[in-house]
Amino acid sequence: MKQRDQISCSLVITTYNSPDTLDLSIRSVLRQSELPCEIIVADDGSTSDTAMLVDALRASAFTPIVHVWQEDKGFRAAAARNKAIAEAKGNYIVIVDGDMLLHPDFIRDHKALALEGSFIQGSRVWLSQENTFRRFISRETAVSIFEPGLENRKSALHLPLLTRMLDFKSSSLGSIKSCNMSFFRNDCILANGFNEDFIGWGREDSEFVVRLINRGIFRRNIRYSAIAAHLWHPENQRRSLTENDRLLQQAIDGKLTSCRNGIDKYLVKR
């Protein structure tokens, strides 16, 4: 197990043409009790509005903000994450989506709970449409368990002592969410990162987890720590789900520990 002071954490935020939500998300990062060593925006082909936002926030940030952009060729979150993780300087990776607001101790919690031989699956609080729209006006990133417009309200409780009591290893694929997940960078590289055969929304995170678990990297569900709130947005189209389900099942049946179309093509020797 690495000591907490040996862990350098890179935060990867995935985004696509949502500068308003990304702005709130990054602002919640910049208010952390412990900043990540860098923020990497994994941009799946956004227009110039996102680059302008990142430049503006970078100017006053106390931690580096890196913008990794790829051409818009449809939903390619797997490739966007791989390119960001390949550039990451930290030995520990936390991944979130650009529509997540992070509790002030979010990074501190992920680092404190990091354990070799495992990855962390965090939970999320859902914010209503009205709650979300209020934040676009107020620019408020703090989330109170008592405020209106919260679903799954108990997930907003921050109780680190209870977190450790409920911490256990699992190999379940249920409720895998890449919007709040962390792992050691080297474990990701050995599994060859996310499978870029996944195009369109869905299952690329579950398939990645299958390969981690097949490599002996167990899942740990974290509750009451590493809290994140999900801003409301319309649901993504799911036209690719049938094919993506097939790729997921292929990894399960084949007991795969790596993939052919992954992160390795972006890596350079350090």
Image (cartoon, rainbow, N blue to C red):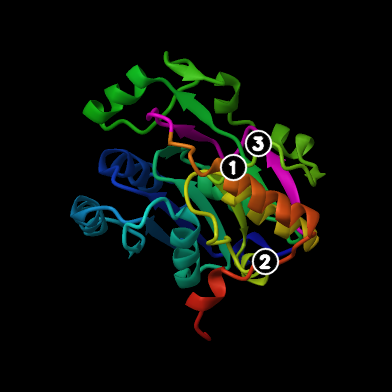
> Which of the two marks, 1 or 2, is nearer to us in this view?
1
Residue 224 included in the magenta stretch of the image: yes
State if disc 1 and disc 3 touch (CB < 8 Å): no
Q: Secondary structure at mark 1?
A: helix
| Observer able to see residue 101 | yes
- Determine whether 253 is above or below 105 in the image: below
Who comes first in sequence, dot 1 or dot 2? 2
- The residue stretch that appears in magenta: 217-235
- Determine whether 242 is above or below 251 in the image: above
Give the x, y percent position of residue 133.
29, 24
In percent of the image, x 59 and y 27: which residue is there?
A: 155
Query: How far apart, in angstroms, are the residues tagged by discs 1 and 2?
Result: 28 Å
Give the x, y percent position of residue 138.
24, 27
Q: Amino acid at mark 2?
A: Asp
Give the x, y percent position of residue 236.
43, 36
Who comes first in sequence, dot 3 or dot 2? 3
Who comes first in sequence, dot 3 or dot 1? 3
Crowd rating for badge 2 (residues with CA inside 10 Å; few <14, some 14–19, many 20+): many
Q: Amino acid at mark 1?
A: Thr
Q: Secondary structure at mark 3?
A: loop
Q: Residue furthest bottom?
A: 269
> Which of the two marks, 3 or 2, is nearer to us in this view?
3
Nearer the observer, 152 or 263:
263
